[in-house]
Image (cartoon, rainbow, N blue to C red):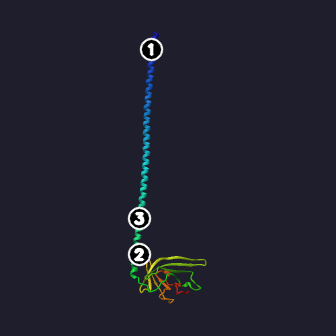
Amino acid sequence: MKKKLISILCISMIFILAGCSISDKKADTQKNDTDKSQNVKDDSENYSSGTKENDEIMQTHDNKSDVDDKKNKSSDDANEKYTQQSNTVNNKQTEENAANDSQKQKDSVKSKVKLHEGIYFDDKCFGENALKDYCEIEISNVTDTSFDFTVYEVNVTDEKEDRKMIFLKNTAVFTGTGTEAAFYGKDYTLSFTFPDNHRAYPVVTDMQVSGFKKLEGKTYVNNSIPGHEFG
C-alpha cells in the first residue's frame, strides 16, 4: 500500500515538474517573441526616424540649392542689366562724340590767330580793387584748327587761393574766318572771340566767351605771353 502511495506521489511530482517546465518554455517563447517584436518595432522606428532625418536633410539641401540658384540668377540678371546699361551709355556717348566730331570737321577752319597755351583770367583782377572771386580759362593742346579749354572758378582769401573746376576739359574749333572759335556740346554751345584790346594781333591776349553764364560779359586776358606782357 505504501509503495503504491509513493509511486502515485512520484508520478504526480513528475507531472507537476513537467508542467512547470512546459510553462517556463512557453513564457520564454512568449518573451522572446515579445522582444523580437519590440526589436522589429524599434528598428522600424529608427528606420523611420533616420528616413525622416535624411528627408529633412535632403529637403534642406534642396531648399539651399533653390536659394543659391535664385541668388545666382539674380546676380546674373543684375550683371546682364548693368552690361546692357553700360553698353547703352557707351553707345549713346559714342554716337554723341561721333556727331560732335562730325560737326567739328564740318565747321573747323584753319586759325588766323595765334592762341597761346596758358591761363586767361578775368581782367578785373588788375588794380587796387582786384576781384576776390573770378573765373579763368586754361588753354591747352593748341593746333591749327582747334584747342582744348577748361574753366575754373577762383576764390582768393588772405590765407590761400581756392581753385575749383566748373567746366570740364573740352575741345573748341576755329570757325568762320579763322578769327573766332566754337564748342559744340550736348548741353552748351560756346562761342569764343578774340578782341585785339592790347594791339597784339594776330597774337591772342584777350578772349571773350558766350554760351556759359559764368563767363559771359567779361574779358579774359593772358599777360604772360613772351613779347606781349602787361599788367
Residue mark closest to the camera, 1 vs 2 = 2
Residue mark closest to the camera, 3 vs 1 = 3
Real-space Cα separation, disc 1 to disc 2, in angstroms: 130 Å
- Secondary element type, mark 2: helix
- Secondary element type, mark 3: helix
Q: First in sequence, mark 3 or 1: give its number.
A: 1
Residue drawn where x is 40% and y is 69% of the image:
88
Position of the C terminus, as image quadrant, is bottom right
Q: Is residue 99 above or below residue 204?
A: above
Nearest to the observer: residue 19 or residue 146:
146
Find disc 3 in the rendering and name its residue: 81
Image coordinates of residue 160 in percent, x first then y, are 59, 77
Real-space Cα separation, disc 3 to disc 1, in angstroms: 107 Å
Near mark 2 (Cα within 10 A), the count class, few <14, some 14-19 or many ≥20, is: some
Q: Amino acid at mark 3?
A: Lys
Q: Amino acid at mark 2?
A: Asn
Q: Is residue 160 left or right of residue 44?
A: right
Find disc 2 in the rendering and name its residue: 97
Residue drawn where x is 43% and y is 30% of the image:
30
